[in-house]
Structure formats: C-alpha cells, structure tokens
Amino acid sequence: MAFDLPVQPVNPKTSRRERLEILKQYYLRILVEDPLEGTQFDCAVLDKIKEIKDREEDEPLKHDPQEDDPELGPIIKETAEEAKRKIYEKYGLKGSEYRPGIGHEMWTEQKRILKEKGIDWKSPKEMNPYIIFD
C-alpha cells in the first residue's frame, strides 16, 4: 500500500509547528494503516520530527558575524540607515511605509556601499537561503 504526501496549498504563514504536525500525522497514518511497509524508515522520520520539535520553536535568523564586530558593526548599521534613506527617497516613502521587495533593494544598496568601503557583507537573504523574504 503506497501513500502520497498530503497535498495542501502552500501558505507562507503556516508555522513551523503546523508543518511538522502535518508530517507527523502523515507518517503516523502509514504506521497505523500498514505497519509492515517501511516501519524502520517511518520510525526514524518520527524520531527526527520529535528532535526538531524539541529544539527551539523558531530559530533566530542568521546574520553576518561581522555585524557583531565592535569596529565593523557600527559601520554596517550606519550603511543600513543610509541605504534605507536612499531607497525610501527613490520611491517617495516616509516613516514606516512599506513596498513589497524593498528589503531586497535596501540590502543590495547596503552591500554596494559596504563593498566600496572594502567590507564583504552578507545580506540576511544570503545568510538564510531557505527563508523567503518579502
């Protein structure tokens, strides 16, 4: 007896805990309905799911370690503000106004400014390639 993964619409707001629960229910269904088919594999997957759930719920985003450097940190922070000002001026935005994709533009501008200063900085997107940023 073969099972397909549950087909569910991709929802970017689905929490990590909900996604793990979907996987857990899927693998439990296999164990209950056909315990002889791949039981060792399914137990290993369930163990992995438990291990992931036991870890911190939402792991923090990774950031470039240079941001923690006492000398480079302030420079990186200043260039972030400079990049934000330039991009906000470009689109005529004020305060906390938002435009989809603007974060990527700010990181690109910040990276360009830092490159001119001889700093090879990694953006949050580069540090977290499996995260989708808006």
Image: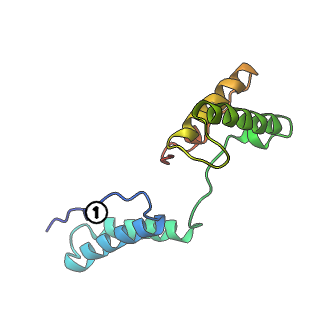
Please report the residue visible at 76 percent of the width from the left and 39 percent of the height from the top. Answer: 77
- In the shown orientation, is residue 89 left or right of residue 32? right
Q: Position of residue 31 (x, y in %)?
A: 27, 75
Furthest residue toward bottom: 32
Most foreground residue, 127 or 84 = 84
Furthest residue toward right: 70
The N terminus lies in quadrant: bottom left
Most foreground residue, 19 or 117 = 117
Q: Position of residue 89 (x, y in %)?
A: 64, 32
Dot 1 falls on a residue whose secondary structure is loop
Instruction: Give the crowd class for mark 1: few <14, some 14-19, many >=20 residues within 10 Å.
Output: few
Residue of label 1: 8
- In the shown orientation, is residue 84 left or right of residue 30? right
Q: Position of residue 47 (x, y in %)?
A: 44, 69
- In the shown orientation, is residue 86 left or right of residue 4? right
Please report the residue visible at 71 percent of the width from the left and 26 percent of the height from the top. Answer: 114
- Quarter holding residue 122: top right
Please report the residue visible at 62 percent of the width from the left and 33 percent of the height from the top. Answer: 87
Most foreground residue, 52 or 67 = 67
How many dots with numbers? 1
Looking at the image, is 83 positioned above or below residue 127? above
Inspect the image, locate mark 1, and give the three-letter code of the amino acid beneath it: Gln
- In the shown orientation, is residue 44 left or right of residue 51? left
- Quarter holding residue 88: top right
Looking at the image, is 23 positioned above or below residue 32? above
Question: Is residue 44 visible to the viewer in this orientation of the structure?
Answer: no
